[in-house]
């Protein structure tokens, strides 16, 4: 079964920013920046993931907390950038 957009984002964040063996579960609305899970370099890694995984160009002006601060905001950002037919498949 294919993973949802949110599951793909969660998997990337957990694999990339949590220590191996760390059983911490990131809450959907938890600020990744305030929790110290991601820094400016991590944001660039996240942007690269979004661009590669979802074929979405991320403009410099879109690299803001409102779009990339939590699993929820990232998921909403990606969903809003995808063509309508792809969004329907992701739900």
Image: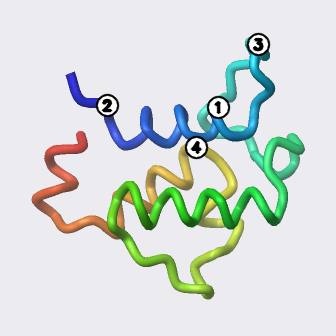
Q: Quadrant of residue 8?
A: top left
- Residue visible at 57% across and 79% down? 62
Q: Which residue is mark 2?
A: 3
Q: Which residue is mark 3?
A: 21
Q: What is the secondary structure assignment of the residue under circle 1?
A: helix
Q: What is the secondary structure assignment of the residue under circle 3?
A: loop
Residue 16 image position (x, y, % from top left): 67, 40
Looking at the image, is mark 2 or mark 3 nearer the viewer? 3
Q: Quadrant of residue 69?
A: bottom right
Residue 5 image position (x, y, % from top left): 37, 43
Circle 2 crowding by C-alpha within 10 Å: few under 14, some 14–19, many from 20: few
Residue 71 circle label: 4
Observer-nearest of 64 and 59: 59
Looking at the image, is mark 4 or mark 1 nearer the viewer? 1
Observer-nearest of 38 and 21: 21
36 in relation to 22, above or below: below
Residue 14 circle label: 1
Cα–Cα gap, marks 4 and 1: 11 Å
39 in relation to 26, above or below: below
Cα–Cα gap, marks 2 and 3: 22 Å
- Of the numbered discs 4 and 2, the one sitting upstream in the chain is 2
Residue 13 image position (x, y, % from top left): 63, 40
Circle 3 crowding by C-alpha within 10 Å: few under 14, some 14–19, many from 20: few
- Of the numbered discs 4 and 3, the one sitting upstream in the chain is 3
Q: What is the secondary structure assignment of the residue under circle 4?
A: helix
Observer-nearest of 77 and 1: 1
- Of the numbered discs 1 and 2, the one sitting upstream in the chain is 2
- Of the numbered discs 4 and 1, the one sitting upstream in the chain is 1
Give the position of the C terminus as an image quadrant.
top left
Q: What is the secondary structure assignment of the residue under circle 2?
A: loop
Cα–Cα gap, marks 3 and 1: 11 Å
């Amino acid at each position: 079964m294919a993973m949802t957009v949110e599951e793909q984002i969660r998997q990337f964040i957990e694999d990339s920013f949590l220590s191996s063996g760390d059983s911490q579960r990131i809450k959907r609305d938890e600020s990744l920046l305030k929790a110290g899970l991601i820094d400016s370099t991590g944001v660039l890694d996240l942007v690269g993931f979004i661009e590669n995984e979802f074929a979405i160009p991320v403009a410099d002006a879109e690299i803001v907390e409102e779009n990339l601060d939590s699993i929820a905001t990232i998921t909403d950002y990606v969903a809003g950038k995808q063509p309508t037919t792809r969004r329907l498949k992701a739900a």
